[in-house]
Image (tube, rainbow, N blue to C red):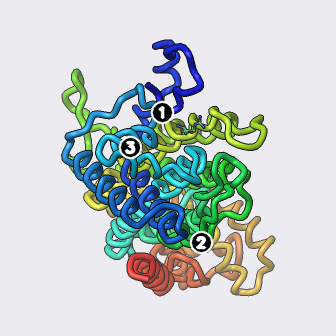
């Protein structure tokens, strides 16, 4: 018979039974469910609501259930609907009367809310660690390429010279924000709904601060209706994960471009690429493509849960059982993407000659040419037009700016002198960009130092 079977005269229809059951996907919260129950039992005993003997029997029973689940000895049953009832039924089988007292002053509505917060809080910790690993891989590559000149792009058109380190470190910054977004999300998530009951709290003299403290929450949530209805924390996490995936997807897109024959800026390690079943020459960036593809799936989960929540009256509604699969799948997806992505970045081989060759075409020193004239006294807007004319002349004559003779240059402006050739060298152009945040080595040094400090701080701070 169902735990709630007392009010019913008929068995549940078997289709309805399967339809209603969530154990197939909420079973993964067994640890959190047991942890929450132990804290609840401890609080009930502290408040004199159950005896200490019952608390000890409950605690021992829950520990044995946990050990058996972890040893693979327990098969959950769909008849017991969800993880909460599965654990309670097992506990009652093992401890009798004591087990039957555990659900005093509690409902599955506050139980599921506390389990999910505990579960996601732990996952945030793991995902954060994985982001830091990716940042470390980025840093390690960046350290070796502070002087590797590559074309920086806008509109995917060659724009100005940067270093490969500078380009990589931009992703390091994006990931920093992802880490802090997750930290913010965890902070707001970290309030305890336990003791909200079904919706209206309880008549027992419970101590909600005690359970909050035992479970490592900052405080109990302030309103019992809100405690059982709120899924903002899951939505916030999905949104932080969507932004994270968007970053990975942009990075993935560049990796895909960079290892194409058209760019050939990098070569992926054999261990991180795949072949074709028909084309013997192929080496494909499947890891990057899958990360890009899986991004859509995480966005979809965010939209799915937002939509599931949008029309729900207070307080708990069964619709909310639909929160778990999207948020679990999003977490799982991010957790498989991050480590393979980090491995791919850590092992990719950078081809500086090809970057340098690409930087050589496309007039990416044109801004520097205009800046040269400006520093000699010409107003920037005039210098801009002058260099525009020079670029036009070069295109018509199949030359680069630095290939023009001094006579050719001076025929356009007498401000040009011998020193223009040094000013147009791409290494100079990059190295002179010393403004805060720029690609000059001293600036990438600073960015590298700061990112390393960030990683250490989050890891150990
Ligand atoms: N399994 C449910 C969920 O995931 C929790 C149980 C609350 N069910 C109920 N009928 N009050 O949301």
Q: Is residue 378 or residue 243 the one in the foreground?
A: 243
2 or 1: tag closer to the N-terminus: 1
- Give the crowd class for mark 3: few <14, some 14-19, many >=20 residues within 10 Å: many
Quadrant for residue 135, please give it. bottom left
Q: Nearer the viewer, residue 20 or 262?
A: 20
Give the structural element (helix, strand or loop) at label 3. helix
Residue 348 percent across, percent down from the top left? 28, 56
Q: Which residue is mark 2?
A: 209
First of labels 2, 3 by sequence position: 3
**Image quarter of the N terminus:** top left
Q: Is the residue indicated by label 3 positioned so its CB lies within 8 Å of ligand 1?
A: no
Does 380 appear above or below 193? below
Quadrant of the rendered image holding ligand 1: top right
Quadrant of the image occupied by residue 51: bottom left
Residues at marks 1 and 3, CA–CA distance in whole angstroms: 12 Å
What residue is disc 1 on? 3
Rendering coords of residue 204 (x, y %): 63, 60
Q: Is residue 352 visible?
A: yes
Left or right: 177 with respect to 34? right
Q: Residue drawn at (32%, 40%), measured in percent from left and top?
A: 93
Q: Is 112 displayed left or right of 54 in the figure?
A: right
Pick the front one: 146 or 370: 146
Reading the image, the residue beneath label 3 is 87
Relative height, residue 357 to residue 109 (above, below):
below
Other-residue count near label 1 (Cα within 10 Å), few / some / many at <14 / 14–19 / ≥20: few
Decide: few, some or many residues near mark 2? Use Cα within 10 Å; few <14, some 14-19, many ≥20: some
Q: Which label lies toward us, 1 or 3?
A: 1
What secondary structure is found at the residue carrying circle 1? Answer: loop
Q: Secondary structure at mark 2?
A: helix
How far apart are the two marked residues, 2 and 3, measured between alpha carbons? Answer: 24 Å
């Amino acid at each position: 018979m169902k735990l709630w079977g007392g009010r019913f005269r008929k068995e549940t229809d078997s289709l309805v039974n399967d339809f209603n059951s969530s154990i197939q996907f909420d079973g993964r919260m067994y640890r959190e469910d047991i942890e929450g129950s132990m804290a609840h039992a401890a609080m009930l005993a502290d408040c004199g609501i159950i005896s200490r003997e019952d608390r000890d029997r409950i605690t021992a029973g829950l520990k044995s259930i946990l050990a058996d689940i972890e040893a693979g000895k327990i098969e959950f049953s769909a008849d017991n609907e969800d993880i909460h009832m599965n654990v309670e039924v097992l506990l009652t089988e093992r401890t009798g009367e004591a087990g039957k007292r555990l659900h005093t002053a509690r409902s599955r509505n506050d139980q599921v809310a506390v389990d999910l917060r505990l579960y996601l809080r732990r996952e945030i910790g793991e995902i954060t660690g994985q982001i830091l690993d990716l940042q470390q891989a980025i840093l390690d590559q960046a350290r070796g390429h502070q002087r590797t000149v590559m074309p920086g792009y806008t509109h995917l058109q060659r724009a100005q010279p940067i270093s490969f380190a500078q380009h990589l470190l931009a992703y390091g910054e994006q990931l920093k924000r992802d880490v802090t977004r997750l930290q913010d999300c965890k902070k707001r998530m970290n309030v305890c709904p336990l003791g909200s009951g079904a919706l209206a709290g309880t008549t027992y003299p419970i101590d909600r601060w005690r359970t909050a403290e035992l479970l490592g929450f900052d405080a109990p949530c302030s309103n019992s209706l809100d405690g059982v209805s709120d899924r903002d924390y899951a939505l916030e996490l999905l949104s932080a994960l969507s932004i994270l995936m968007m970053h990975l997807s942009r990075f993935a897109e560049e990796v895909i471009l960079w290892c194409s024959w058209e760019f050939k800026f990098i070569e992926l390690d054999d261990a991180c690429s795949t072949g074709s079943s028909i084309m013997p020459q192929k080496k494909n960036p499947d890891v990057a493509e899958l990360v890009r593809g899986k991004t859509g799936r995480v966005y979809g989960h965010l939209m799915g849960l937002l939509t599931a929540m949008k029309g729900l009256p207070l307080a708990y509604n069964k619709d909310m059982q639909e929160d778990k699969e999207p948020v679990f799948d999003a977490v799982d997806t991010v957790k498989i993407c991050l480590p393979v992505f980090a491995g791919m970045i850590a092992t990719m081989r950078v081809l500086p000659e090809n970057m340098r060759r690409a930087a050589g075409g496309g007039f990416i020193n044109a801004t520097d040419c205009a800046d040269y004239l400006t520093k000699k006294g010409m107003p920037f807007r005039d210098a801009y037009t002058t260099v525009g004319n020079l670029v036009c002349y070069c295109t018509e004559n199949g030359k680069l700016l630095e290939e023009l003779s001094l006579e050719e240059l001076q025929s356009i402006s007498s401000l040009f002198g011998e020193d223009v050739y040094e000013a147009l060298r791409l290494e100079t152009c990059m190295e002179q960009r010393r403004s805060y945040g720029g690609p000059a080595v001293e600036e990438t040094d600073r960015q590298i130092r700061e990112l390393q400090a960030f990683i250490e701080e989050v890891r150990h701070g």
